Image (tube, rainbow, N blue to C red):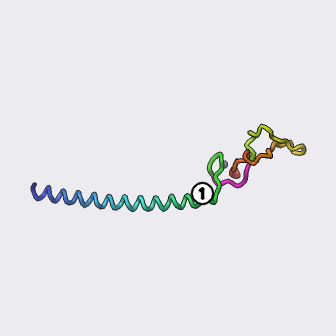
Amino acid sequence: MSSSSLTALIVLVTLIHIAAFAVMIVIRVRRNEVDGTIGRSALITPCSVCGEPATHRSYDGLDPNEQRDPHTGRAYSTDMAHYQPVCAAH
Ligand SMILES: [Zn+2]
């Protein structure tokens, strides 16, 4: 093996080490970002329609025993399982 190809090999190995080190840093930063996202989503309930932070719950209209308010005419349910978290837009 000539000295020039040996030098090229050393440079290549060094570059691989630098690249591996950079990848490790990126993975560590990504992991911290994911942890942060999980911590935040535990506090904020996402909208069932678009995933934005929900501001209230809305009846999904799927209760077979749905009730109707005699004053407003609006359908509602006595089963909380039919209420989905939604954002202000939905
Ligand atoms: Zn929404």
Q: Nearer the viewer, residue 11 or 20?
A: 20
Looking at the image, is 89 positioned above or below residue 40?
above
Instruction: Say which residue appears at 46% left-offset and 59% top-offset.
Output: 31
Looking at the image, is 30 positioned above or below residue 84?
below
Per the rendered image, the range of residues in magenta is 52-57
Determine which quarter of the picture holds residue 71: top right
Instruction: Say which residue appears at 28% left-offset and 57% top-offset.
Output: 16
Question: Picture coordinates of residue 3 (x, y %)?
Answer: 11, 59
Looking at the image, is 62 positioned above or below residue 6?
above
For this view, does 19 lie left or right of residue 50? left
Instruction: Say which residue appears at 57% left-offset and 61% top-offset.
Output: 39
Which residue is denoted by mark 1 in the rendering?
A: 41
Q: Badge 1: how crowded within 10 Å, few (<14), some, or many (20+)? A: few
Residue type, label 1: Ser
For this view, does 64 lie left or right of residue 47? right
Question: Is 56 inside the magenta-drawn segment?
Answer: yes
Question: Picture coordinates of residue 52 (x, y %)?
Answer: 63, 52
- Mark 1 element type: helix
Question: Picture coordinates of residue 68 (x, y %)?
Answer: 85, 41
Magenta span dominant secondary structure: loop
Question: Picture coordinates of residue 25 (x, y %)?
Answer: 39, 62
Q: Nearer the viewer, residue 4 or 58?
A: 58
Figure quadrant of the N terminus: bottom left
For this view, does 57 lie left or right of residue 67? left
For this view, does 85 lie left or right of residue 30? right
Residue farthest toward the left in the current orientation of the protein: 2
The residue at label 1 has a CB less than 8 Å from ligand 1: no
Question: Is 21 inside the magenta-drawn segment?
Answer: no
